[in-house]
Image (tube, coloured by chain):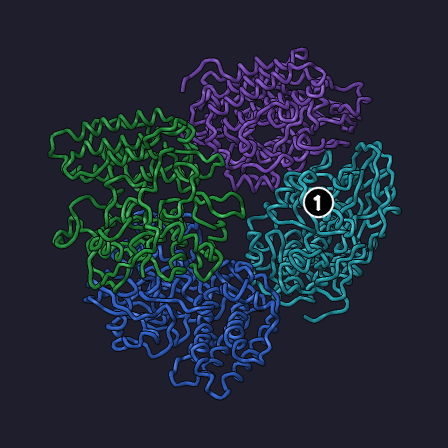
Chain colours: A green, B blue, C cyan, D purple
Amino acid sequence: MTVIDECPMMHAKATTVEAPDRCLLSRLLDSRKATERLIEPLEPEDLCLQGMAEASPPKWHLAHTTWFFETLVLKPHLPAYSGADPCWSFLFNSYYDSIGSRHPRPERGLLTRPAIRDVITWRHHVDRSLHTLLQRPAHGNCKLQPLVELGIQHEQQHQELLLMDLLDGFGRQPTEPVYCNSWDDTADPCSGSEANWLNMEGGLVAIGISGEEDARHRDGHQGDGFHFDNESPWHRTWLEPFQLADQLVSNAEYRNFIADGGYERPELWMSEGWVMRGQRGWQAPRYWRGDGPASAWAWEFSLAGRQPLDPHSPVRHLSWFEADAYARWADARLPTEAEWEIAARLQGQRLAQLHGVLWQWTASPYRPYPGFKAAPGAMGEYNGKFMSGQFVLRGSSFLTPAGHGRDTYRNFFQPGSRWLAAGIRLAR
Amino acid sequence: MTVIDECPMMHAKATTVEAPDRCLLSRLLDSRKATERLIEPLEPEDLCLQGMAEASPPKWHLAHTTWFFETLVLKPHLPAYSGADPCWSFLFNSYYDSIGSRHPRPERGLLTRPAIRDVITWRHHVDRSLHTLLQRPAHGNCKLQPLVELGIQHEQQHQELLLMDLLDGFGRQPTEPVYCNSWDDTADPCSGSEANWLNMEGGLVAIGISGEEDARHRDGHQGDGFHFDNESPWHRTWLEPFQLADQLVSNAEYRNFIADGGYERPELWMSEGWVMRGQRGWQAPRYWRGDGPASAWAWEFSLAGRQPLDPHSPVRHLSWFEADAYARWADARLPTEAEWEIAARLQGQRLAQLHGVLWQWTASPYRPYPGFKAAPGAMGEYNGKFMSGQFVLRGSSFLTPAGHGRDTYRNFFQPGSRWLAAGIRLAR
Amino acid sequence: MTVIDECPMMHAKATTVEAPDRCLLSRLLDSRKATERLIEPLEPEDLCLQGMAEASPPKWHLAHTTWFFETLVLKPHLPAYSGADPCWSFLFNSYYDSIGSRHPRPERGLLTRPAIRDVITWRHHVDRSLHTLLQRPAHGNCKLQPLVELGIQHEQQHQELLLMDLLDGFGRQPTEPVYCNSWDDTADPCSGSEANWLNMEGGLVAIGISGEEDARHRDGHQGDGFHFDNESPWHRTWLEPFQLADQLVSNAEYRNFIADGGYERPELWMSEGWVMRGQRGWQAPRYWRGDGPASAWAWEFSLAGRQPLDPHSPVRHLSWFEADAYARWADARLPTEAEWEIAARLQGQRLAQLHGVLWQWTASPYRPYPGFKAAPGAMGEYNGKFMSGQFVLRGSSFLTPAGHGRDTYRNFFQPGSRWLAAGIRLAR
Amino acid sequence: MTVIDECPMMHAKATTVEAPDRCLLSRLLDSRKATERLIEPLEPEDLCLQGMAEASPPKWHLAHTTWFFETLVLKPHLPAYSGADPCWSFLFNSYYDSIGSRHPRPERGLLTRPAIRDVITWRHHVDRSLHTLLQRPAHGNCKLQPLVELGIQHEQQHQELLLMDLLDGFGRQPTEPVYCNSWDDTADPCSGSEANWLNMEGGLVAIGISGEEDARHRDGHQGDGFHFDNESPWHRTWLEPFQLADQLVSNAEYRNFIADGGYERPELWMSEGWVMRGQRGWQAPRYWRGDGPASAWAWEFSLAGRQPLDPHSPVRHLSWFEADAYARWADARLPTEAEWEIAARLQGQRLAQLHGVLWQWTASPYRPYPGFKAAPGAMGEYNGKFMSGQFVLRGSSFLTPAGHGRDTYRNFFQPGSRWLAAGIRLAR
């Protein structure tokens, strides 16, 4: 592997900075290019690496995001567009039932073909076609703008997924590969002292973003830029007074939880998590490493390879069950998503590590906001059909492309997931 | 099997009617006896029948409820008490980690020993000891009263579970056994016409029941009788205006959903439910039966054996995923648990089938109320550790012992569960 | 359980002694009765006990053997015969594809109905009908005789299976039930000193039994009584000189193997067995018991409950893989089935424990003898379709009904099976 | 992919022709080079392709064969040798328990690192070291010669495995990749008419090859070149007269079996195979393809991609269970391995397609020859520990490197395996 000094992700972050007035096409092409830069440090064999059924290989991400534009933007809106081999539509559909059947998810790693060369060629063909489409006289493009914007956001989500999934796949290899030597994800450490509790008075508050259909509620809430459907509608909710920690839980603090038997005390855990802990042999966050079975956890595996475990870095890569158990041990709890959003809006300047560090598990199951209605067709499948069995995370992580996160963003994962870059912020 | 005219469950309902002023001991002994009456119609082989890992055999229920009193009431409070074989504590602990290890749940059906004779003897020994304990001079009993009350409620819950589990086990047998010929669970049918929508204005409401610690909030809420810890604390929540159907969805209405392709249209389903539907081959509610693979659903299996499917009976034995998909198909949704509780409190007399018919799936994941804290020790495991991955059901069912349900009751099951007596009430 | 002095199995052995000149009908009815006596010491709940997918509940054995006579003897040959509920044919067919579909094997334990009462009534109805059939004028019965004889042998096989399966199901219960207090299976112990090696000169030998079709080969081989199709044809095979141990391996000898790391040394094991050993956690024969995780093996579970492990008893209830590994450790090997049969025929009087003690694993995969052809129809499924993936055992066990075994008998099980009463005789 | 005209495998066959007098070192280096040529037509992503747990990725084969020489030849015999990263020994050990623990087989496809560049560098380092070792003064090399010879044979086995495994991995991709356009494996077709039955008289014959220890038996048997341990000892066995088909079963003949309901008639199958057929949905040989679910089988997937199914080619890629069922349907049977070997030795010139076409399933379970003893240490694990649960195949296939096969060769696979290049020769 060529060790490169400038991490592609850092570059991606820089180039995709959100600028509301930037040309849509230019932002689109920048984000497409940023995705391709992510695979520059990889060996060719890495391109098909799928560490587990929930993850996807890098090449698949490159192909799927291209499929997204081809299927949802170009084919319906650019009549002359000539698409790829129809079989690819089967291969690179992720989960859109309304579009057709698809290759089984756990076998994405078997797709050594089409080769990366052909996928890149396809990407560029699609990019050129998008260029053609979006430079046509503007009248039709008003309708296209939200769709293309969604495509950009989707592309950015897969930039983060690509790296998450890669870390998972690298983490399963005894050789402990390095993605990028100069990767530095410790830029925003915890303070080294205990978190302060920020007092929030609660009451009748409103969260979320209005969709177009409820524009009459626009006063007093966010809503100028892009948002996903699941962030709307803007709606009222009641909060009792609460306190929120002004920083995330650190590795040092989490080590105390382990030392105090946190992984051996069922009274701290949800029953479902306790069983999972046993079956999967959890003893520490996912990428902590020791020097032997009985040794202390002295290392952490990361995209920069094995690194000393930094006590001041926020603890990461743990499941909702671990976050919930830690909170109970600390005589606290996880915040609800409404608490998180209100605090971020009102006290954003006093709360450290809100964005760009780690996704933050909340106490809230992922469910529709009151009045939510999924859009018809494939777009309605984007977020709406996952509203059972998952928990909401708020904020954004060091893997999230710059400009992608916002206070109303609702990320969601199953509570046993550990491969996303998630951490803990306490409430009480 | 001796076909008996009077169903034991009917008798159980009658004898356990809640009367606030009845003597605790007498209510206790009545409920203990009611459990035993439930096995009267069974063949001896039925006593160890465990149809699936989630269900338990009848004998196990009889033993476990006895273990509960022995372990949590008698051993700590009656010094002279001589318990059963210590091995039985391992066999009949359900899920209390704080009490010790236990026999694996999926293998409860293998426990042919102790024989029913010995379990009944044990039950009577425990009942006599409870009699001794509770007739002692009263000073110590104030403390015991809540514990014994919990034991009665626990006993009643297992009366319902025993019958649910039995129906599951009978339903797996090609011989389609009859539990009770005179069983009649069609006493409270739907009206035969469409449900009416009851208007509720919402606003800032309060639900739940105060625990002792928040007695200062007592005005305006329920709270005189028993409640489980998960029903407290009493707390405020905001509701937008909503409408609630004044009756449950009927078999005839659900048949329309099936006829309209309800089980073949992914856009109606949560993704998780859609996958489960395919893997488990769901095509109709769990106990609907046809005369052949391609035939219409003309029958329903029940505790009275195979019966003609009554179009006016409320549809039952379906999962949360099916209830949720049905609601989407009907251009409606499931109510939240707060909506259900408020409507039941304010409009209870105008809402049919609230209690004693079917548990009603809500849109609410089962999570702690704001401020909830699990009790220390085994009691804290009763409800508190299951607050992930499940949905709340409200009301009570035709299998629920009389007096056991109430408007604030929070039943909970995993969303794929179909063996409980659950149905659908729509909201919008 | 009523502790009974005379074990039903002992009785069964006594009553079923083979007498070539005994009336077929009387032998048939005796063997039918012997099966029923086996369940006398059981609790009713035991009747549906199925410890694992490979085993069947006692009641199922009683029903299946009855199904066998009804389906293969009565229905085709007694025109007036009125059979049981057609559904029972589905429930109690074991593995006969040519007869129709059947209830899934792992769910036999769920069949609490028909109740034992109804199964016994059915048995007696079938017995009476067999009585009627076999007392008709004899001309048609010549053809029936082999079929009825097969039915008797089949009944006897299930007598052994019933007890094997029961031991398995009892062995999974922490209460360690006793089938029969007076059960004594130590009647034929090892000598206490090392086995002697009996010299056999080998050469061109012949084994097996002629079927009717090869009666011309009758000189010099067995063949007067009943035999299964898989014991024929009589055929020649070449044996190099070999030695056979004159007794089985004892518990004391096997304990030395364990003490010498037998379960931790992969070089002693077939690869397939080594993996299975790890996955299933094998550390000793199946029913050996210790007083704690680290203790010595001081006990053995048996049909008489937990008993002290007798060092002089032949070691039993181990897999082919364990037998094969032990043999390698002992610098010996397992005999082929031809070696066993020739030695038994020529030196039967000098070889201890040939019959009635333990089945003896051989080195021979279970395959057809040269020239073997399965019969057409259901009878051809009896043995012929299992001739892959299994190993042959020779001899017979303390569970085998008297008169059922013979030197040419080919029993067969998968090499990982441990619940049959099998032991080890060494060769070299 | 660069479509290349000359297939690497063809080249490999040519360069590795056995010449008894060729220099060992030169044969070694040729065979090492031949392996590397096999990956020339591949895309980089193909290098880690592992279609199923039983198969290995191409890069893994390249690394494992190198590990073999490093571990078993260089480290023990070349004191100055400096080996690869010790971690690689864990990664590339296949199944040698005596050497240490190893990476789990089903996860070989996750090993994207070391990259192919590093594996090739390692190969060349090992090749140079072998060159050094084998050019030392000869005295020590006598001992080394058998070890190096085993290494060459091992290398050749993995050449075949690499292509088998690749075909499996390619066959799972909807894009149906082509390994080599000019691949031609139809060079040795069936005659187009029915096979002739060759009469063999049987009697007391001898098969196998003497090891050094039984050199006294050398007259009348093969034994000059290399052989694996499982081919010895030379030993006598008795054969009844038999007939052997002079060619393999063709695609056209096998199509008749399918058309006659071969896959729907349980009476033709071993019970174990019948169940497997149902679970895995077998309806035809593994790589047969149709144009739709109900269409005829018109195509076959191969290393040359999808090709028209040639009726005259011998049917291939089917399991032992299918071969056995076909034979039963054809009123014949599979030959035993002794029959095959004797016929090949005595009538080799009259039997078509003995070598270089397809491996041929025999009726013989893979078991040790009488007197076989596995060598001590790692070498004893090569063949000896797999002698349960598998069947012997004789001959060699179009994927077998030239010079690798011989009449006494005992290949072995589990009876459900379909990804090896195996076909059917009938006997009766």
Residue D389 versus residue B8 in the image, above or below: above
Name the side, left or right, on which C123 lies relative to D282: right
Q: Quadrant of the N terminus of chain B?
A: bottom right
Name the quadrant containing residue C402.
Answer: bottom right
Instruction: List the single residue furthest toward the top.
Output: D21
Q: Is residue C136 left or right of residue C90?
A: right
Determine which residue is flagged by label 1. Answer: C262
| Quadrant location, the C terminus of chain B | bottom left
Q: Nearer the viewer, residue C135 or D173?
A: D173
Q: Which residue occupies the foreground of this view, B209 or B80? A: B80
Q: In this view of the protein, can residue D280 be seen by the observer? A: yes
At x 69% / y 17%, what residue is drawn? D348
Residue at the spot 17% in from the left edge and 44% down from the top edge: A225
Q: Residue furthest bottom?
A: B137
Whether residue D8 is situated above or below residue A60 in the rendered picture: above
Residue D310 coordinates in the image, percent (x, y)? 50, 21
